[in-house]
Image (cartoon, grey):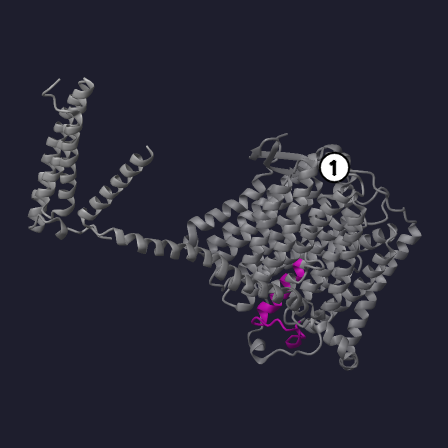
Amino acid sequence: MSGVIPLSWSLALSATLFVIGVVGVLVRRNALVIFMSIELMLNAANLAFVAFGRSLQSLDGQIFVFFVMTVAAAEVAVGLAIIVNLFRLRETVFVDEVNLLKG
Amino acid sequence: MTLPLISLIPALPLAAVALHLLLGDRLGKRGTALLACGAVGAAFLLALRAVFALAARPEADRTLVEIVTTWMRAGDFSVDISFLLDPLSAVMILVVTGVGFLIHVYSIGYMAHDASFRRFFLYLNLFMFAMLTLVLADNFLLMFVGWEGVGLCSYLLIGFWYERPSAAQAGKKAFVVNRIGDFGFLLGMLTLFAFGGTLNFTRLFAVAPHVFAAGGTVITIATLLLFLGATGKSAQIPLYVWLPDAMEGPTPVSALIHAATMVTAGVYMVARCHVLFRLAPVSLEVVAVVGAATALFAATIGLAQNDIKRVLAYSTVSQLGYMFMACGVGAFSAGIFHLMTHSFFKALLFLGAGSVIHALSNEQDLRRMGALSSRLPWTHGTMLVATLAITGLPPLAGFFSKDEILSSAFASGHFGVWLVGVAGAVITAFYMFRLYILCFRGSSRLTHEAEQHLHESRPSMIAPLVVLAVLSAVGGWVGMPFQAGGHAFERWLRPVFEGGPAFAPARELSHGTEWALVAVSVTAGVIGILTALRLYLQSPQTATSLASRYASLRTLLVNKYWIDELLDAAVVRPFGAFSGWLWRFWDVVIVDGTVNAVGYALEGASAVLRLFQTGFVGTYALFLALGVAAMLLHFLRHG
């Protein structure tokens, strides 16, 4: 079956995207960018689901992706609301300036 | 006919206590006094009615039990709140409510000027409740409730004037010493339960002869422990030391609690448990010897005391010794007889002393009294009756009971005990007449101030004195000796003391011997009286010269054999030091140290952990990522 992308390639792409997302969350200060990085990780996971679903000839992977996308949409709504409120309160979206939880 | 309501007798004073607490000072002094005396008076009338109902029953059937409710039940262990009225408790409730009522009435006058009038009557009523519970209880546990209750009231009333350090101290001493005795009582009770399986008097006494081997170790230990409780409550050697100090309380309290009723609880308890004591001859011997020793020992201390109330206190200890002596030689009814007559004349002596103290503006020292007979005629007359009664001169009450005790001791073959008792009687007569002469005869040694305010007490205080004087005079006639089949008092108590295991009956004394014994005890009293008259009235210089000749003996007696100092050095101080060590080492170092160490350890660990809580979400995410990476690595390697 030529023209079919091997599973390992898809997984490698997924892992790369995921690590980019992780590093983005860890190193960026802007809450919006961190948020985008989280989306990146979610989509990396989606990619892995789809790839496995296809490789195993099962629909489960596709269905999981729908769920993840739904949850991600909800999460974006909540997360953006938090960020907007944070900005109203502190006039900043840089997370290192928000350390009220320090013990 | 309907059964008399026994439970109402203790319930009335309790209801009065509740009313005192609920209504407070709204009652006013008059209302408070009326409530307190009314409750006790009504209890006395109820007690009379109950006793008449009891007497109307056939002799074999004179036991009434009223079960109020089940107190506790666990498995086959159950204790009821129930009251037992038999000839023995009948005597006790009559004495307690009767003498108690008179003392309540007397207290109205005595405490009239006290700021804590209401508190005083509240405590007195509470005491009446506890005492009646004690004597009416039909099981050990309920009796113990009353036992502890009277101890509490005794503590509260000794320390009634708590702003005086000596009173507070005396209350504490009474409480602590009584705790030692109570501990013995509790252990004895538990031993009996462990072997007998019940705490109910009737059931326990019924099974006792089958469960306990006569003269066996268990019953001997149990009864000795019970007797330890009795020595605490009834101020016998070795636990008598609290009673003389208890005189710090108001005088009516001394009369009610520390002469007439509470201190006799030990005698009552021993008499109530006569079945058990008869199974343990060794314990009975101990009771007799301790009683005799206390009777003599306390009497000698009474010789040299100058505080009028302290003389009476030692006299009480001594007379309680006579009661135990009677129980110890198996003459329980004689012991209860003396308990009754003693409560009449000793309550009278204390109330009379209170009247004197009241008249002399709180002077208690015999050396600053004298020649009061004409100034306080009523007090003097009644006191003289009581003094003669305690001395044991016929036909006054003390003669009959004391003579019966002495002849019982003689008849049972306890000649040593008898001899000690006779010696005690001589000394009793002597110190009582010394008190009487120093107080009422001779020359006046009053301070100028006391002389100014000298007055006879008001009628409400004199009336109880007169009633008690009549009782002290004729109260012994129910125990007229030389009657075929025993005298009335003995016949009344016989159904109680007859039951139980066979007991070697005392030898029947011939009439000649009985008369001789009577002659001996009367002579003993007369010798004491004459000596006192000679030494203190006719030639006081002889007394002084005797005192200086035997100065060391006198010092010994004045200082009460240094028993208090000895106990202080041998028990109180070492115990205090031990407690101090427990405090400074065990409590502060070990207990507090452990708790603090836990605190410090948590604090230290937290100080390290808080370094990880930076407040930056990034840091937390980093830890999370590192953790996930570590897990992945682990699974990759070993998975």
Q: Is residue A82 above or below residue B161?
A: above
Q: Secondary structure at mark 1?
A: helix
Q: Quadrant of residue B455?
A: bottom right
Q: Is residue B373 above or below residue B519?
A: below
Q: Is residue B380 above or below residue B63?
A: below
Residue drawn at x 74%, y 43% as measured from the top left: B218
Q: Quadrant of residue B313?
A: bottom right
Name, please, the residue furthest toward the front. A2
Q: Quadrant of residue B601?
A: bottom left
Q: Is residue B69 visible?
A: no
Q: Residues within 10 Å of mark 1 (few under 14, many from 20)?
A: many
Check residue A36 for magenta coloring: no
Q: Label 1 is found on which chain of the structure?
A: B
Percent coordinates x, y for residue B163 in the rendering = 49, 66
Tell me if B546 is positioned left or right of A47 in this view.
right
Percent coordinates x, y for residue B621 in the rendering = 20, 44
Tell me if B630 is positioned left or right of B146 in this view.
left
Q: Which residues are magenta?
A: B347-372
Q: Is residue B508 visible?
A: yes
